[in-house]
Amino acid sequence: MNRATEATVQAPASVRRAPLIAAWGSRRVRRAAGRLALYLVLAAGSVVFLLPFYYMLNMAVSTPASIGKYPPDWIPRPIMLSNFPEGWVAYYNFTKYLRNTLLITSATLVGQLVSCTLVGYGFARLRFYGRGVWFVILLSTMMLPSQVTLVPQYVIFAKLKWVNTYKPLIVPAYFGSAFYIFLLRQFFMTLPRDLDDAARIDGCGYLSILLRVLLPLCKPPLIAVGVFSFVSHWSDFFGPLIYLNDPEKWTLVLGTTALVTSWGHTFIHMGYVMAVTTLVVVPVLVIYFWAQRYFIEGITLTGVRG
């Protein structure tokens, strides 16, 4: 084949690249369109989930006349920031409820972090007879609804004379939680065993390996467990309702529920109710946003680092 024939057979380079550029451009367009659709769906979902929070905050800074107004004002006028301090002390002593809640939440948080870390480390790193069977039994407790064990637990605590004290809400946390133990055990298993061997050569025992070698690498799952524990005990309603009879020992959630029962049916005090509810929710939101990065990293169970 001579040069003239080759020129007629082979198309110019720009012409040959044109379909590739068009295909690449179409992929970019499809990817951008898909990403735009995803953002629109996420934005719509965010609006749906944030609307109740905005409505709560709107009512917390509204006057009684604005709360009963229809259609409601999206931006209340005037803004009643005084609802927050007045609602906090108007009917119940929420400062005392805050102290009670902080006591229960901090004590249970420490108990669950210590007990679940030790048990999770044992299941992941120690070799003992029946380890798999005991772990399956532990996981099977997650299948039991809490209502099933409520009556026997209450009978036991009543015989121990722990009812109307904080002990039924705090002491069980020091015996661990099946889900948190499972979470930490899975993270410990992702860490290389060479770390244990190197520490053992340096003379470390099991507890030293845990405290000096493994725990510094377990910051994400520990924070995830801490966030789970804090949120569940800060917002726990059922446990304090069952075991705390004295109003002086109530938690924030019980106090807020009593406030809603007392004032929630009138527009006059609805601003106070929503203001107190907002203040109760704020610590949970602050801790979640502060620990969001560690929380997600701990859940993904990626413990191996370079």
Image: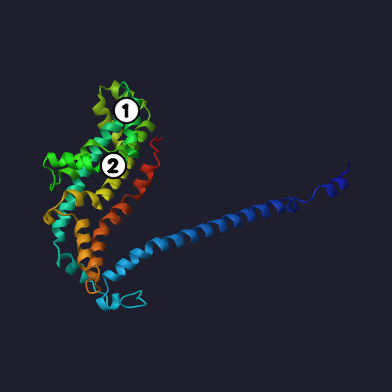
Q: Which quarter of the rendering shows the N terminus? A: top right
Secondary element at image label 2: loop
Residue type at numbered disc 1: Trp
37 horizontally vs 154: left or right: right
Which residue in the protein does label 1 denote?
134
Which residue in the protein does label 2 denote?
148
Question: Which residue does the image show at 30% across and 66% down from the upper left?
Answer: 56
Residue 9 locus on image (x, y percent): 84, 47
Pointer 2 with pointer 1, Cβ within 8 A: no
- Dot 2 surroundings within 10 Å: few (below 14), some, or many (20 or more)? few
Question: Which residue does the image show at 40% across and 38% down from the upper left?
Answer: 302
255 vs 230, nearest the viewer: 255
182 vs 144, nearest the viewer: 144
Of callouts 2 and 1, which one flags the residue occurring earlier in the amino acid sequence? 1
81 vs 146, nearest the viewer: 146
Residue 107 locus on image (x, y percent): 18, 44
Question: Which residue does the image show at 32% across and 49% down from the upper left?
Answer: 291
Residue 210 locus on image (x, y percent): 27, 30
Which of the 4 quarters of the picture holds residue 195? top left
214 horizontally vs 173: left or right: right
